[in-house]
Image (cartoon, rainbow, N blue to C red):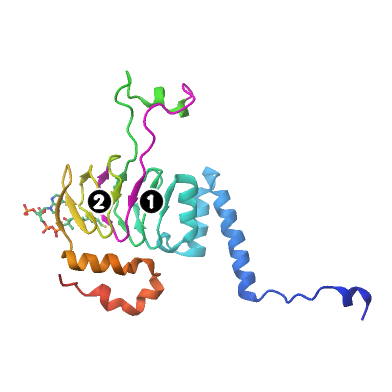
Amino acid sequence: MTETTATRPVTAPPSQPEVRTERRTAITDALVRLYAIRRLRPLVLWMLRRLEGDAYKSPTIRTIFARYWGVEIGMYTIGACFEPWVVDPKTKIGRYCSIAHGVRIINGNHPLGLKSTNAVFHNPMFGLCDDWIGDELNALEIGNDVWIGANAVILPEVTRVGHGAVIGAGAVVSKDVPDYGVVLGNPARLVKKRFSDETIAALLEERWWDQDLEDLTHRLPEFQNYLGG
Ligand SMILES: CC(C)(COP(=O)(O)OP(=O)(O)OC[C@H]1O[C@@H](n2cnc3c(N)ncnc32)[C@H](O)[C@@H]1OP(=O)(O)O)[C@@H](O)C(=O)NCCC(=O)NCCS
């Protein structure tokens, strides 16, 4: 045995799954960076689908939306929230939500008290002012297991949509929505709750949405039979 080989530190080669995970992370990190180049975005999204499947189970598309669009989206949430400009920055959407086509989540108003509401005067993007003039964007938190129907609009005044809530198609929501509330119309009104107070309390206590989908698949009857109460 030569001096060199004898003194070389002996490190076990990384096991195959570790290597694969590291390589995968390097690729997804690179894709997140490449998303900054607008013309590459379709390619990045296509590659991500190949690597991680549909958006509802892709961790990397969530990283992209948090970093580039200021929107946090929980795992297993599906729908239009993965389209740019649908959801304003400072929105946090929980897990297992369903966001239908045509939804718009708006967190800011143009200032009404200026001579003009036109953004060229108050948005620094147009180069006529250094800082945004008017109120900051509001933060909105959407709970877990929320269903937002087609073409619903959530206005900046809303700060919380509760867990399990339903927003009907075409609703214009201007107030917070309670846990498991169903709101309809323009302006949206609370018409009912999905379940009794006892059932809602049990669901909020259980927080089934904290579990990953793979861990819920052995409990499918709970999710595929109607709940009483
Ligand atoms: C909210 C929703 C689930 C209905 O809930 P529901 O409790 O079963 O309501 P019902 O169908 O029993 O209707 C109850 C009343 O609300 C009215 N209503 C139902 N949906 C409404 C809506 N989106 N906006 C206004 N009124 C609505 C009904 O006309 C009915 O009125 P009435 O009591 O005067 O007859 C449904 O109407 C809805 O909006 N679904 C969204 C569908 C969608 O966007 N899918 C996209 C794919 S994800």
> Which amino acid type is shown beneath numbered disc 1?
Lys
Whole-percent x and y of residue 192? 14, 56
The quarter holding residue 29 reads: bottom right
Foreground: disc 2 or disc 1: 1
Report the residue marked by disc 1. 92
Whole-percent x and y of residue 34? 57, 49
Asked if residue 20 lies left or right of residue 217, the reply is: right
Quadrant of image for the N terminus: bottom right
Magenta span covers which residues?
Answer: 127-154
Residue under the image location 93 percent in, 78 percent down: 2
Whole-percent x and y of residue 52? 49, 64
Question: In the image, is residue 143 part of the stretch drawn in magenta?
Answer: yes
Between residues 32 and 194, which one lies in front from this camera angle?
Answer: 194
Question: In the image, is residue 118 part of the stretch drawn in magenta?
Answer: no
Please tell me in which quarter of the rendered image ligand 1 is found: bottom left
Asked if residue 182 lies left or right of residue 69, the reply is: left
Specify the farthest residue to the right: 2
Question: Does any atom of ligand 1 lie closer than 8 Å to the CB of label 2?
Answer: yes
Label 1: element kind: strand
Residue under the image location 46 percent in, 61 percent down: 58
Label 2: element kind: loop
Q: Which mark is residue 150?
A: 2
Quadrant of image for the C terminus: bottom left
- CA gap between label 2 and label 1 equals 19 Å
From the viewer's perspective, is residue 228 above or below residue 35? Answer: below
Residue under the image location 38 percent in, 43 percent down: 88
